[in-house]
Image (tube, helix red, strand yellow):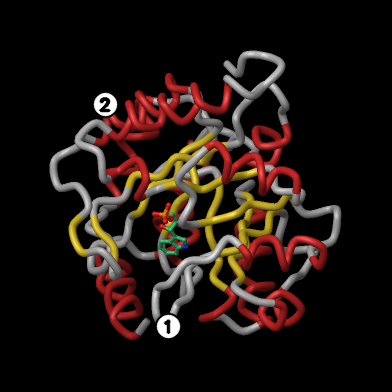
């Protein structure tokens, strides 16, 4: 997080917050991730563009962001998640601006938010929603960052790993979706049980998203049963040389079990 703070300070030297804030006036009304996930004619899949990760190293160095994100949406994803962190995930802000230019759908900006400036930045690059990670934030920060995001029309997905993080940081004035991360931050192991166990503790008013380690239609159906409406999937798609095709196959697999064909 110290690295993130330095990076934000450098960017703020280039474009001061006041200047960035004034430019936001010209931006379009964001799309609601909540609403897209609650539609029952869509898959609920949030397809992620991620080149590398701390647990796996490089996952995909070559897939172009234009073709991949456009392909994800054509395949039947409900929304996109784009990593903009460079150090650990090989992303950049430009990846999100490109995804924005090519797609009409909610886009989640995935980064480590430690400063208000990053929220102005998220809006300025065309995001519709931001991620706040409970494990690295205080309850006061979640509230402050969440309210700023809301005032800009951005939705907040609060990421938690356990009940302690959930009860400590969940604030209805700041958060509209809760994401349960199945990946253990300490040893990177994944268990879908994490999502199953926490589901009942998340109040109804929040849209539930399950994150990490999802690989099959069976995983999605199982977690939908448990109350989840959003399914964040990165690696299972990105490890293919054509991530959008992997997404298409998963949606087809899901369609085979659905009474209606998902669009
Ligand atoms: O690649 P996976 O196992 O499908 O996981 C996607 C997503 O959940 C993961 O990238 C993620 C979840 N929370 C994060 C916070 C920061 C960066 C990345 C993440």
Query: Which numbered dot is residue 48?
Result: none
**Residue at x-position 60% and y-position 18%:** 262
Query: Alpha-carbon neighbours of circle 2 within 10 Å: few (<14), some, or many (≥20)?
Result: some
Seen in the picture, residue 140 relative to 93 is either above or below; the reply is below
**Label 2: which secondary element:** helix
Question: Circle 1: is it few (<14), some (14-19), or many (20+) Cα within 10 Å?
Answer: few
Say which mark, if any, is on residue 67.
Answer: 2
Q: Residue furthest right?
A: 204
Looking at the figure, which quarter contains the N terminus? bottom left
Q: Secondary structure at mark 1?
A: loop
Residue sitting at x 63%, y 24%: 257
Where is mark 1, residue-wise? 186
Q: Nearer the viewer, residue 87 or 215?
A: 215
| x then y, percent, for residue 123 | 48, 48
Q: Position of residue 9 (x, y in %)?
A: 31, 76
* 193 on left or right of 9: right
Query: Is residue 186 left or right of 163 when viewed as pictured?
Result: left
């Amino acid at each position: 997080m110290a690295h993130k703070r330095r990076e934000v300070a450098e960017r703020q030297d280039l474009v001061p917050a006041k200047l960035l804030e004034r430019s936001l006036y010209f931006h379009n009304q964001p799309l609601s991730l909540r609403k897209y996930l609650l539609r029952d004619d869509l898959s609920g899949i949030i397809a992620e563009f991620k080149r590398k990760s701390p647990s796996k190293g490089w996952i995909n160095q070559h897939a172009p962001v234009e073709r991949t994100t456009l392909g994800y949406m054509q395949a039947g994803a409900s929304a996109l998640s784009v990593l903009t962190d460079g150090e650990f995930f090989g992303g950049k802000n430009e990846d999100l601006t490109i995804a924005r230019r090519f797609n009409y759908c909610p886009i989640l900006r995935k980064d480590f938010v430690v400063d208000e400036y990053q929220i102005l930045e998220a809006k300025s690059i065309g995001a519709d929603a931001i991620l706040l990670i409970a494990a690295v934030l205080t309850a006061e920060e979640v509230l402050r960052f969440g309210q700023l995001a809301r005032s800009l029309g951005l939705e907040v997905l609060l990421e938690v790993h356990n009940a302690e993080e959930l009860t400590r940081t969940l604030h209805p004035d700041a958060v509209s979706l809760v994401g349960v991360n199945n990946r253990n931050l300490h040893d990177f192991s994944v268990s879908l049980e994490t999502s199953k166990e926490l589901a009942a503790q998340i109040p109804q008013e929040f849209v539930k998203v399950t994150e990490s380690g999802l690989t099959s239609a069976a995983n999605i159906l199982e977690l939908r049963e448990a109350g989840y409406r959003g399914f964040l999937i990165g690696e299972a798609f990105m490890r293919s040389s054509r991530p959008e095709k992997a997404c298409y196959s998963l949606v087809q697999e899901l369609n085979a079990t659905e009474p209606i064909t998902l669009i």
